Amino acid sequence: MNDEEQVWLERARNGDRAAFGRLVEAYQGPVYNLAYRMLNNRGEAEEAAQEAFIRAYTRLDSYDPQRKFSTWLLSITSNYCIDLIRKRRVTLLSLEEPLPAHPALMSDHADGPEAQTLNHEREALVQSLLATLPEEYRETVVLRYWYDMSYEEIAEVMDTTVSAIKSRLFRARRQLAEATTDGEVAERLQPHLN
């Protein structure tokens, strides 16, 4: 966290709503993206992001300044999304809403229509494969490969151990490999899942 964000956080902890608004502006993208990847629904993700910020604001007194604010905020978001998933019991999947592009899925020549079509196909494939994973595996994969979080950060967000995170990632990669029965599909995705 930079010095300016630290000032906003301190002011927000003292009740300054405008300062918290600056934090919302700074983190609305990552919070929404995490919610969207977990819930796979734009409307639900928007509501979850709003709720995560409300919860963060009302719990600022419990924030430990020794932790990264982004990790704490993403933990609130993740936990709220897990609660939503558990409540609905059945994961609703929509392949019409594409997964925001991960840089590893982009080709070198993403300008042309052929490359764009290929990227959309890859995004839909990745989204459908993610949807096959249990929620805790999906969350772990998203935090690791889309947010480039360390094992330690993921463990903190998910309130578990580093060894549990490594185990979940191993099992998730194995399930994804099993889900890809087409050798070409598995071959295209393998570099992105290692």
Image (cartoon, grey):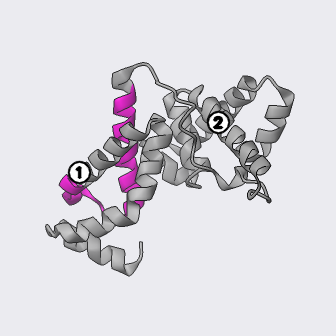
Q: Which residues are magenta?
A: 57-85
User: What amino acid is labelled 2 in the image?
Assistant: Ala
Q: Residue at x 18, y 66 (%)?
A: 17
Residue 124: image tag: 2
Q: Main secondary structure of the magenta part?
A: helix
Image disc number at residue 54 = 1
Q: Quadrant of the C terminus?
A: top right
Q: Would you say 7 lies left or right of 125 here?
A: left
Closest to the observer: 185 or 14? 185
The disc, 2 or 1, on the residue closer to the chain's N-terminal end is: 1
Q: Position of residue 162 (x, y in %)?
A: 54, 45
Task: Work out whether 153 lies above or below 139.
Answer: below
Where residue 177 appears, as percent x and y from the top left, is 74, 29
> Residue placed farthest to the left in the image?
15
- The three-letter amino acid code for the residue at tag 1 is Ile
Image quarter where the N terminus lies is bottom left
